[in-house]
Image (spheres, grey):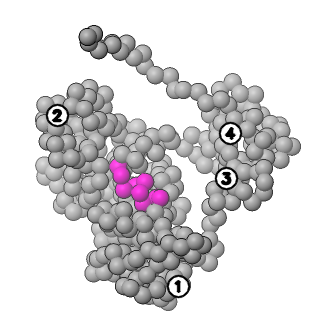
Amino acid sequence: MKLAILSCSPKAYSTRRFKEAAEQRGHRVKVLNTLKFAIDLERNSPDLYYRQSPLSIYDAVLPRIGASITYYGTAVVRQFQEMDVFCANTSHGIINSRDKLRSLQILSRHHIGIPKTAFVRDKKDVLPAIERVGGAPVIIKLIEGTQGIGVLLAESNKQAESIIELLQSQKQNVLIQKFVAESKGRDVRAFVVGDQVVAAMRRVAQGQEFRSNVHRGGVAEPIELDQQYIDTAVRCTQILGLRVAGVDMLEGKDGPQVMEVNSSPGLEGIETCTELDVAGAVIDYIAAQVDFPEVDVRQRLTVSRGYGVSEIYVPEGSKFVGQSITETGLPEQDINVLTLYRGPRIIPNPRLGRTLESGDKLLCFGKLESMRGLVPARTRRKRRPAVQELDTHVND
């Protein structure tokens, strides 16, 4: 395999370890500076130049895109994708995870625990938002901060209001987030590769510091994760469209609370702590994907005219509740159930005799016309009674 590592920091620990792990396994590998690429666009012929010369052929790319070059870096990754080169993380996944608000918005519609979070712009909305997330103390985060930078703890509503006002005056977008007191300055980092957690550590803040990042002086210890934490980490990675990620979770009283999903997780802390070859696990995964790549079903929807993929929801009171997949008549309508989602559980290729329950979601492939009649009309989520808005215009 010929591998390109996209990195502006060839001497960084993570970059060196990935290169070393690839070479140990007999792969050809080069570290390429992400900012030295030029993108050429032409009909039916996307191309890349590197340092003014046509780029040679690569089998796979491992992006290490820093936050400061997200736009250009993801454009380069996207060009590799258009050239049909396997990318360990796609540009779409990197963009989803890089923006904390965007990632939480995506995760919020799934069965994923996240701390209560608010995003506001108007000064008048700040105090009500703080109250909605549970009141002070609250965490205030810059949307694109990394390594604990731009994460502040406000002990009072007044302090939070002042911090937010200052940051917004500097054109910074900030999130207001519930402070999960029971985490006690600790968090969990799960390193996900494909559909597995290959290493995990608990980071503990020191002294009066509430941030547990190793870069902030936090102490790390290796841990064995409960299955609930493993499932959450893997699902977050997949939902955001990533294959390699570091998932940071708080240990809340109701289970894992996802803080952040990092598309370029560092290796030094977790490899030193766990003494595991995490870099090697990533390289092995990439090599396996190059040999036997996964198919993106979304790009294959038009293979057979009139066929496609859709999600069928089984609401409470549905005639499907209590019936097996066979009894629903789906197979007779040329509809195949690929995956059954039941709460946090994912059941691939479920047996035809499996009984459906209220709240199940079925990912199906089949005749679109048949499936269209099975998808319930979209209903709006019930909201709390709203205060009647008053017409405040002034008559001339």
Could you tell me which secondary element the residue under label 3 belongs to?
Answer: strand
Could you say which disc has been placed on residue 57 in the image?
A: 1
Q: Position of residue 216 (x, y in %)?
A: 19, 59
Could you tell me which secondary element the residue under label 4 belongs to?
Answer: strand
The quarter of the image holding the N terminus is: bottom right
Position of residue 289 relative to residue 185, above or below, is below
Q: Nearer the viewer, mark 1 or mark 2?
A: 1
Could you tell me which secondary element the residue under label 2 belongs to?
Answer: helix
Q: Earlier in the sequence, mark 1 or mark 2?
A: 1
Residue drawn at the location 26% of the way across and 10% of the way down: 396
Report whether residue 58 is seen: yes
Residue pointed to by mark 3 = 348
Q: Earlier in the sequence, mark 3 or mark 1?
A: 1
Alpha carbon of mark 1 to alpha carbon of mark 2: how far?
A: 53 Å
Q: Nearer the viewer, mark 3 or mark 2?
A: 2
Q: Nearer the viewer, mark 4 or mark 3?
A: 4
Residue pointed to by mark 4 = 312
Q: Earlier in the sequence, mark 1 or mark 4?
A: 1
Q: Amino acid at mark 1?
A: Ile
Magenta stretch bounds? 92-100
Q: Amino acid at mark 4?
A: Ile
Alpha carbon of mark 3 to alpha carbon of mark 1: how far?
A: 35 Å
Disc 2 crowd, CA 10 A, few/some/many (<14, 14-19, 20+): some
